[in-house]
Amino acid sequence: MKIVDKLRKAILALLILSGPLYSIGQQDPMYTQYIFNLQTINPAYAGSWQTMGFLALSRHQWVGITGHPTTQTFSFQTPLTSQNVGIGFDVVHDKLGSERRIMVNVDYSYRIMLNDVVALRFGLKGGFTNYNNDLNSLQPYPDGTPDQALLGVVENKFMPNVGLGMFLSSSKYYLSLSLPRLFQNSFNENTGNFSKMSEVRQFYFAGGVVFNLSENIKFKPTFMTKASVGSPFQYDVSANFLLAEKFWIGGMYRSGDAFGAIAQWIINNRFRIGYAADFTFSDLRNYQKGVHEVMISYEIAFTKKKYVSPRYF
């Protein structure tokens, strides 16, 4: 009962801190392989690998459409000597048409062991976004005539921000609750009365569990929800199977957007390669060639301890 009470109070504290916040819009980069990339939205995930870890991910959305969204992510995390403190950082380059965002954040987490196998981490994130939008590059008319209302450059807008999160986990399940940006940044440009809501607040709630189906097959269902005031509620669900502790394979569904396939090869306890493909069922389905996402991660263990099985989250 003490563990339940502690968890209830912790969740209540996070909701109280973020409850008064108001936001509109929804613009965070999305990832199909989100379960292995939670650090970008939840600082409490930093240190959860219990190894020094590096992750790189590249996502290309709606390939075939000029100016289609692309996102490149690099993250690093490591526990400190005590194992109760985790630190890390992540860098995200997000491109959509003429818009460019570079987001740089530092992450800190602190772990509390609720019992021998369950850990609760609290996390803080701090960093900035650098925003650039070359409106001169837009050509809304077929003959290339520029729109006088869209002339100008919104460049190097420096926007600091902070975020927070919690991560509850054991070797077989996890729950993640986070608000990666507390401040809602926006700006107005005098050129053509151009205005832009550059950063909005979004809540994320995610979770997953692993079931043993047989000696060589494990089943892992996961989910992620995203919510912000003024935007549609969105959720992702996925079902993945781990074969012989070496290959993940499965599928996903994203509400109002797409379904897809996920695969990951665990080359060894340190090195992984993942790939995901999404297929939208929106009106864009006839004008693009899908969404492709490639991920690579590498870990450095601090001890020579042998792993019984790879981590699942």
Image: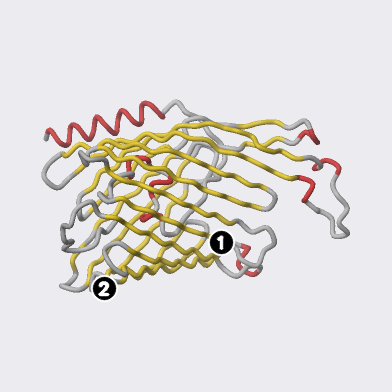
Mark 1 surroundings: few (<14), some (14-19) or many (≥20) residues within 10 A: some
Give the quadrant of the N terminus.
top left
Q: Which residue is mark 1?
A: 60
Looking at the rendered image, the quarter that the C terminus falls into is bottom left
Residue 60 in the image: x percent, y percent?
A: 56, 61
State left or right for residue 39 relative to residue 82.
Answer: right
Pointer 2: what residue? 243
Q: Using the image, determine if residue 294 lies above or below residue 69.
A: below
Q: Earlier in the sequence, mark 2 or mark 1?
A: 1
Residue ID at (47%, 50%) = 234
Task: Give the CA distance from mark 2 to mark 1.
Answer: 27 Å
Tell me the crowding category of disc 2: few under 14, some 14 to 19, or many 20 or more residues within 10 angstroms, Cα based: some
Above or below for 215 versus 43: below
Total number of numbered discs in the rendering? 2
The residue type indicated by label 2 comes to: Leu
Q: Which residue: 43% across, 62% down?
A: 295
Between 160 and 243, the residue placed more toward the observer is 160
Q: Is residue 142 left or right of residue 122?
A: right
* Rendering quarter of residue 197: top right
Residue 197 image label: none
Q: Position of residue 157 (x, y in %)?
A: 64, 34
Give the image location of residue 93, x and y in percent: 55, 49
- Color scheme of the displayed model: secondary structure
Q: Is residue 8 above or below residue 75?
A: above
